[in-house]
Image: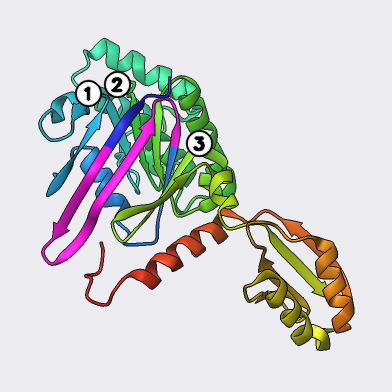
């Protein structure tokens, strides 16, 4: 099913004189991962708080599984889970004790809360540590426990707000595996992250937010295609760098970036540019290239290009964004 389960239309939110959201629109198909990217202060967390019924918009509306997040907040809360930027578990309790406590807070009968706690501990590889105090857990184990507390009620939509911040690569990989497993079972995930490789690995679609509104959407590959392929060049003699830069800027129509004493990188025009043309241009300019390498841009490069373009269009009269 690809019908949208998360829909936001024209969301506005201000805090005093600070405009956090400026007409944000978002649509997330059921059973997918939507990666929400943006600079610090772009409005990502504000948008998540509204969608999770923790804050009301000043204007616009949003729906989760067809229910309005303001007028039908109770119905929405029955269908969502939320794991924030820091672990919300009690360090003095055991892992099992935390999950049982959350089950009771969600009004599950005692026996059902105990059974659900054991299911989740076993499923996410924490059963061996179930009866140890959380204070002795590693950072990755705490984040996994925090994640599964949001799954007590089997949510249709799970909001993950920077779930792997501060984790080592191995722990991040464990969280990624958990997210993939949830989506395979039908859960829709809205993921905010500062790690663009995380969005690249996990997200079916990406929404880039800046200055309180969505400025670009698409799959990771679609977004990369918008800025064209990138050519990396290594010259044999660093003294030839100025001539190489002139050739590349003339042929590509944009200034290359120097990546070292003998390296240049340039975004090629969307219509493409033949390597043979570049080699011919270097020959005419007397530039000997040790290496020419064509590659797709990274999501980091796409992100920087998109947000830089928006910054250029924002006037000095606009307020800062939370």
Total marks drawn? 3
| Image quadrant where one finds the N terminus | top left
Mark 2 nearby-residue class (10 Å; few <14, some 14–19, many ≥20): some
x and y, in percent, of residue 175 in the image? 50, 38
| In contact (CB < 8 Å): disc 2 and disc 1 | yes
| Image quadrant where one finds the C terminus | bottom left
| In contact (CB < 8 Å): disc 1 and disc 3 | no
The residue carrying mark 2 is 153
The residue carrying mark 3 is 204
Q: Is residue 65 visible?
A: yes
Q: Which of the 4 image quarters holds residue 270? A: bottom right
> Relative to residue 83, is residue 274 depicted above or below?
below
Q: Residue at x 36, y 21 (%)?
A: 117
Mark 3 nearby-residue class (10 Å; few <14, some 14–19, many ≥20): some
Horizontal arrangement in the rendering, residue 210 relative to residue 237 (left or right): left
- State which region is magenta: 8-33
Q: Nearer the viewer, residue 288 or 183?
A: 288
Dot 1 falls on a residue whose secondary structure is loop
The residue carrying mark 1 is 78
């Amino acid at each position: 099913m690809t019908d949208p389960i998360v829909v936001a239309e024209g969301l506005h939110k201000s805090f005093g004189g600070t405009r956090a959201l400026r007409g944000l629109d978002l649509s997330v198909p059921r059973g997918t991962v939507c990666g929400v990217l943006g600079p610090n202060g772009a409005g990502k967390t504000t948008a998540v708080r509204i969608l999770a019924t923790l804050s009301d918009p000043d204007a616009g509306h949003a729906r989760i599984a067809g229910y309005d997040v303001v007028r039908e907040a109770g119905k929405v809360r029955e269908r969502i889970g939320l794991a924030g930027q820091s672990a919300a578990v009690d360090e003095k309790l055991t892992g099992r004790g935390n999950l049982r406590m959350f089950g009771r807070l969600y009004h599950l009968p005692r026996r059902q809360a105990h059974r659900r706690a054991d299911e989740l501990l076993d499923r996410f590889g924490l059963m061996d540590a179930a009866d140890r105090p959380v204070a002795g857990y590693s950072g990755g184990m705490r984040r996994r426990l925090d994640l599964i507390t949001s799954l007590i009620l089997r949510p249709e939509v799970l909001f993950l707000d920077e779930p792997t911040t501060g984790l080592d690569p191995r722990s991040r990989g464990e969280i990624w595996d958990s997210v993939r497993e949830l989506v395979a079972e039908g859960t829709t995930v809205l993921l905010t992250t500062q790690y663009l490789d995380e969005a690249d690995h996990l997200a079916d679609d990406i929404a880039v937010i800046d200055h309180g509104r969505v400025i670009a959407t698409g799959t990771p590959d679609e977004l990369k295609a918008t800025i064209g392929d990138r050519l990396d060049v290594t010259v044999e003699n660093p003294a030839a760098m100025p001539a190489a830069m002139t050739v590349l800027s003339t042929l590509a129509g944009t200034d290359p970036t120097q990546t070292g004493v003998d390296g240049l990188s340039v975004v090629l025009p969307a219509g493409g540019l033949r390597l043979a043309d570049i080699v011919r241009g270097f020959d005419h300019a007397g530039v000997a290239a040790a290496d020419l390498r064509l590659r797709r841009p990274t999501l980091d490069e796409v992100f920087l290009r998109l947000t830089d373009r928006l910054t250029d269009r924002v006037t000095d009269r606009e307020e800062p964004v939370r």
